Image (tube, helix red, strand yellow):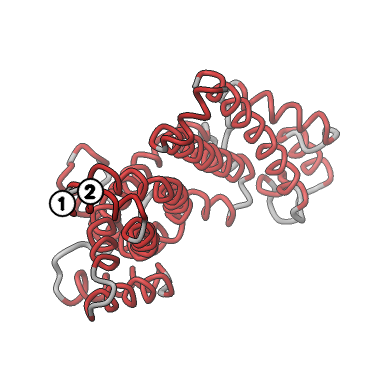
Amino acid sequence: MGRYLLRRTAFLLASLLLAASLLFVLLRLLPGDPANALLPMGATPEQIAAARHEVGSDLPLPRQYAAWLGDLVRLDLGTSYISKLPVGEEIAGRLAVTVPLTLLAFALAVLVALPVGFLAAYRAHRWYGALLSGLSQLGIAVPVFWIGMLLVTVFALKLRLLPAGGFPRQDWAEPGRALTSLALPIVTIALVMSASLIRYVRSATLDVLTADYLRTARAMGESFAGAMWRHGLRNASVPVISILGIELATTFLGAVVVESVFALPGLGTMLVKGIAEHDYPVIQGVLAVSTLAVLVIGFAADVVQRLVDPRLRTRLGRS
């Protein structure tokens, strides 16, 4: 296990280096100069030269790349061209909205998807099993922003039960108001994510229900619940764990859309604002943190999957 963790950690670090390099290259391929965010209309050549020197865009690309990697190693994400604030501190403040939104929506989606997906598989030949499967397929096709606007129309504008958007200025100093503000965004994300998860849980459960080892356990006198608990649960969870990691990463990245719909001051809103203002340090910082989160989630899901799967544990013991 120790050797596997070392190999997987080395792969994670290599992936981070590759992602940082691609991010640097792709941003430099965009039209315009990063210094343009600092320049007024009709700037003189002297002002342009001074602005380029300030942001470092007058340096050769290899030196810019080396400086970018050096700052990342020191966890320095630079200073915003517009607000003049450290990007790392701004991101930390925004994560106080994005991380709870992502985790709470993920937890709600899992709580819904596991029993519904199992029921859709266990009663696949009944009308309600087919209905659950069809509804989950429909949920995958519906855009997340449309669900968000629909929930706002019903629960905020018509019923006036929940706020349409925004977040308390005191952040989590008032947890009740903060959770109320996140209620509709959480439900929006959870509905879309649970629709996808239901399909995977249903598929994994169907594989287990038709497996020889489950029939053998039943033939030896075990109850259906006991056989599922002792033999089916672990085998069904192996493919689902990897999907959970992908869904969690997708939810974190998809927060940009949901936060825009509900006007939440999270990481997604910060990215949209940075792009609109051509604030390169903000764009680089948000994308770097998002990439790190996705890779770390994938790393964790891979490790958990190998711990759960007895076959993979056997391979680890031999390595």
Residue 126 to residue 46: above or below: below
Q: Is residue 150 left or right of residue 19?
A: left
Instruction: Tell me the quarter of the image containing the C terminus.
Output: top right
Q: Which residue is most to the front?
A: 220
Q: Is the Cβ of the residue at disc 2 closer than 8 Å to that at disc 1?
A: yes
- Residue 30 at x, y percent in the picture: 74, 54
For disc 2, the marked residue is: 227
Q: Residues within 10 Å of mark 2 (few under 14, many from 20)?
A: some
Q: Residue drawn 38% across and 36% down? A: 308
Amino acid identity at mark 2: Ala
Q: How many discs appear?
A: 2
Q: Which residue is most to the top?
A: 2
- Residue 119 at x, y percent in the picture: 23, 65
The local secondary structure at tag 2 comes to: helix
- Residue 63 at x, y percent in the picture: 81, 28
Most foreground residue, 121 or 200: 121
For disc 1, the marked residue is: 223
